Image (tube, helix red, strand yellow):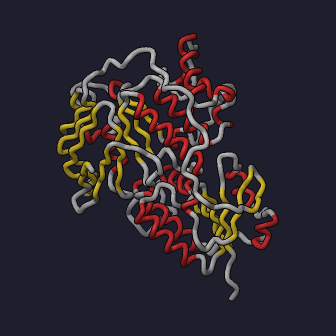
Amino acid sequence: MKSPKHWAIFTNNNSKKDPFIQQLMKGKFPEPLSTLSEREGALFSKISLEKLIQEEDRHDIKIINKDTEQRLSTMSSGEQKKTLLKYLLQLDPGFLILDNPFDNLDAESQQALRARLQEVSKTTSIIQLLSRKGDLLPFCEQHLTLDVSTLQPLENTAIENQPKALFNGQIPLPFQSNPYQDPILVECKNISVTYGEKEVLNNINWTIKQGEFWQLKGANGSGKSTLLSMITGDNHKGYNQELYLFGKRKGSGESVWDIKKNIGYYTPSMTDNFSGLHTAFNMVISGLNDSIGLYLRSTENQKALAKEWLLLLDMWHLRDVLFADLTRGQQRMIMTARAMIKHPPLLILDEPTAGLDDESASLFIALVNKIAAETHTAIVFVSHRTEPGLQPQYDYQLYPGPHGSTGEKL
């Protein structure tokens, strides 16, 4: 039997990846992939999972996880992808498209997925679309790059970890310092969380102080999202526990907005499907009003401060470009500026480099390091990747156990 062919297609922030995938799924193949003509493929991607989760929630039915009691939305990223791959392979596709398959996976889950895909490659043609060169699957020996919408041969797969641009100037100062001046921002004392019979967190003790730079680490399903939701005030499990947020014990009469005014927060899901017609300039300004998009008339002082941020990011020339038309890397920069424009006491970045190419991720990491060095804002950075160049002062590691995850400062 003839061995299947496999391709690795490297993408960057100029690649029109989504339309390219749609064309492949419709059976329209460019010349380098013409051997796949007349075959029907399957798509292994974050988008596929999100659609399935929406269907499950909307119609209260299980589509790909019928053999389990657990809902797809409550699974860890690793379990979701494992379940999706099993379902797609049951369809016996003529080829399989992998869209950044290792994003949001811990090291163990990545290793397991790599081993499974190695087996799949023996019988099924695979097209791997990847942003990070370190994710390259070894059996994908034909290397291409998606230059906007055109496939071209790729000669160099070496990883460059240094950003090609530097930031000019200092982090812009806010209009006024935040009124919260206590050195302790967040204090978790013996925090435990249980959902039904599932124990998630077990006696978590963690203190975050002003100006500290933390990386929150842990395997898929270890409770990182649960812990973050406690800190942002979104999780009702924080009541009746010794959880202190910005000087007040959770449940002592504070509103969720009292908590959120002290936090800058960004995760890619906030804007992945954002379709508002707002310019890059207005998106930065909107951080002063805690809205995504600008709905109030801005003052001259607000405009001047937003201009400082765009000049720092070397994006002033893009001020009138619609946010949705920016590259993914540019969008992340804008959203970080938006989160930081008021210099909140705490900045939470949840998987902020997911989906970025190596150069854009490196530039983003340089910006985060700069914020940590030049401001009093504490940072909690969450990622399953070990990002080259990231300079946290401390790591807080979650360790899954039979009675929920325990935590340790490293």
Residue 183 % position (x, y): 25, 27
* Farthest-out residue, right: 31
Q: Is residue 19 left or right of residue 42?
A: right
- Nearer to the camera, 68 or 118: 118
Q: Is residue 243 left or right of residue 220?
A: left
Q: Is residue 325 left or right of residue 226?
A: right
Disc tally is 0
Residue at 53 percent of width and 29 percent of height: 292
Residue at 65 percent of width and 41 percent of height: 327
Residue 14 vertical position relative to residue 108 in the rendered view, above or below? above
Residue 353 % position (x, y): 51, 47
Residue 301 % position (x, y): 54, 12
Quarter-of-image position of residue 360 = top right
Residue 345 vertical position relative to residue 326 in the rendered view, above or below? above
* Farthest-out residue, bottom: 1
Residue at 45 percent of width and 70 percent of height: 112
Residue 12 % position (x, y): 65, 50
Q: Is residue 287 left or right of residue 246?
A: right
- Nearer to the camera, 295 or 386: 386
Residue at 44 percent of width and 61 percent of height: 78
* Quadrant placement of the N terminus: bottom right
